[in-house]
């Protein structure tokens, strides 16, 4: 069959890993001759890349699916795919709930999309959720940006946090080889990308499942070694990484970030709760004292580093006093960004079965109080930028003001300033900050740093 004029649409829910998976699957579809289509209602292939971290994300998928399932009754050639974590969690149950689906595929199967779709086009309804070794990706992703890119370094997670569904849906840890990661980064450097974010569900676990030696004979046993190994890739000006786990976060990694000029001074380290009993119930494997020591060590090496985190309120059994321990940690540390969530019971996780669940009213009240304090602290942290000169990597035009461009500082603050996107896209510009808001900055350009391929 020919697919030259057929169109596809992907809707992505959830985390950066899902965004990276969607870019890879878009690359597979374009290799097969499909064209991207903005409007799902005009697409011949619709793919929902789903997230199951919270219940509302899952419900949203079902409402989107319902609309397209109806459309399929009039257009039987429409191909409907659910990929990602809801697909992995629900498997065949999804087909019972939405019989119009053609393909249900877990995140480990993203690189197999072509084979799975060919089976669908032969008339099969396919469920691919079995555990597999993730095949090394040879498809070029269709990346959403021409300036910044994701690069996966490790898939899956071996942790067993009692609230989290990720290990059930993303499988066991599988590190990519250092040479495959470096080769992908070198190709991105050649294509003109300037910033790479190295991704892992638990990035500090990188290398635990590898033999520990690169083809060049260098010993490479962990994520810090990997940073040193890829730091000098030509053309790449900035490196970021996510997500870190306090249990494995080392002083050596902090030292590497302070030493390596391309690594941005920005750390995303979830703490989830400021109370030790709750951290134990969550199976997080650290105390709030250890978490504070990590932040103190970062600030000793890099006093200006930005720190962002994830936190859950309303975990089963959380008392008012325990919640106040979380507020105290937020007050004491002063995060540059805080991702907050009320606890949401997930299928197949231990905490979902506990009988000490809190009411939605308590969860909602605590979330509001936490957000209020978090936003005050973020606004305070933003003040330090006023009057400073920050280096900003220009990514795009400001959609709300065509005379401005926008990009991020090394500390990950969104920054706007006047300029022509045609001239400045992908450039590092020194910007004097003239206006600060809690989550973004405005400034005036001072100097453009011309970057050339080494």
Image: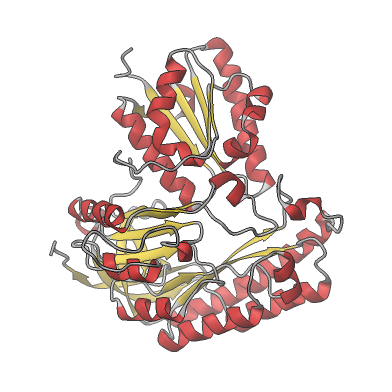
Farthest bottom residue? Answer: 300
Q: Does the rendering let one see residue 37?
A: no
Instruction: Find residue 439 and report its horizontal and vertical position in percent.
Output: 50, 67
Please identify the quadrant where the C terminus is shown.
Answer: bottom left
Residue beneath the point at 68% across and 63% down: 312
Give the quarter of the image for residue 238: bottom left
Say left or right for 223 vs 342: left
Instruction: Find residue 434 and report its horizontal and vertical position in percent.
Output: 38, 76
Give the quarter of the image for residue 323: bottom right
Q: How is the image coloured?
A: secondary structure
Q: How many marks?
A: 0
Residue beneath the point at 33% across and 12% down: 1
Give the quarter of the image for residue 374: bottom right
Instruction: Find residue 321 and report its horizontal and vertical position in percent.
Output: 81, 76
Say left or right for 37 vs 86: left
164 or 371: nearer the eye? 164
Q: Is residue 131 above or below residue 233?
A: above
Farthest right residue? Answer: 355
Residue beneath the point at 64% across and 83% down: 289
243 or 419: nearer the eye? 243
Instruction: Find residue 177 and report its horizontal and vertical position in percent.
Output: 33, 55
Residue beneath the point at 27% across and 56% down: 179
Q: Does the rendering let one see residue 70?
A: yes
């Amino acid at each position: 069959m020919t697919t030259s004029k057929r169109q596809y649409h992907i809707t992505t829910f959830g985390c950066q890993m899902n965004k990276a998976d969607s870019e890879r699957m878009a690359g597979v579809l374009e290799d097969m001759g499909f064209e991207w289509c903005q409007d799902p209602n005009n697409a011949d292939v619709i793919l929902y890349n789903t997230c199951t971290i919270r219940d509302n994300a899952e419900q949203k998928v079902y409402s989107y699916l319902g609309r397209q399932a109806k459309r399929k009754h009039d257009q039987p050639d429409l191909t409907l795919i659910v990929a990602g974590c809801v697909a992995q969690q629900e498997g065949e149950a999804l087909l019972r709930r939405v019989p119009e689906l053609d393909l249900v595929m877990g995140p480990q199967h993203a690189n197999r999309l072509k084979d799975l779709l060919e089976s669908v086009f032969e008339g099969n309804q396919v469920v691919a959720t079995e555990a597999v070794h993730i095949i090394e990706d040879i498809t070029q992703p269709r990346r959403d940006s021409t300036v910044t890119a994701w690069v996966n370094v490790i898939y899956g997670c071996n942790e067993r946090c009692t609230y989290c569904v990720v290990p059930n849906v993303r499988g066991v840890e599988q590190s990519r080889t250092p040479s495959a990661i470096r080769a992908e980064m070198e190709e991105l450097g050649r294509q003109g990308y300037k910033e790479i974010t190295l991704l892992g569900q638990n990035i500090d676990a990188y290398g635990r499942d590898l033999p520990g030696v690169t083809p060049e004979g260098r010993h490479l046993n962990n994520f810090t070694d990997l940073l040193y190994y890829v730091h000098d890739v030509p053309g790449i000006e900035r490196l970021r990484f996510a997500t870190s786990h306090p249990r494995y976060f080392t002083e050596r990694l902090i030292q590497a970030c302070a030493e390596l000029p391309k690594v941005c001074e920005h750390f995303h380290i979830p703490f989830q709760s400021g109370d030790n009993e709750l951290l134990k119930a969550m199976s997080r494997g650290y105390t709030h004292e250890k978490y504070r020591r990590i932040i103190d060590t970062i600030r000793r090496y890099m006093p200006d580093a930005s720190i962002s985190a994830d936190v859950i309120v309303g975990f089963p059994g959380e008392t008012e006093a325990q919640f106040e321990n979380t507020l105290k940690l937020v007050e004491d540390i002063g995060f540059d960004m805080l991702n907050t969530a009320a606890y949401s019971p997930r299928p197949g996780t231990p905490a979902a079965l506990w009988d000490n669940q809190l009411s939605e009213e308590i969860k909602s009240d605590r979330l509001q109080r936490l957000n209020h304090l978090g936003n005050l602290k973020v606004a305070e942290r933003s003040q330090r930028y006023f009057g400073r000169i920050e280096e900003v990597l220009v990514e795009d035009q400001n959609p709300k003001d065509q005379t401005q461009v926008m990009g991020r500082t090394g500390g990950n603050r969104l920054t706007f300033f006047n300029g022509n996107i045609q001239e400045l896209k992908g450039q590092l510009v020194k910007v004097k900050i003239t206006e600060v808001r809690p989550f973004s900055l405005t400034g005036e350009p001072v100097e453009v740093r011309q970057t050339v391929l080494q």
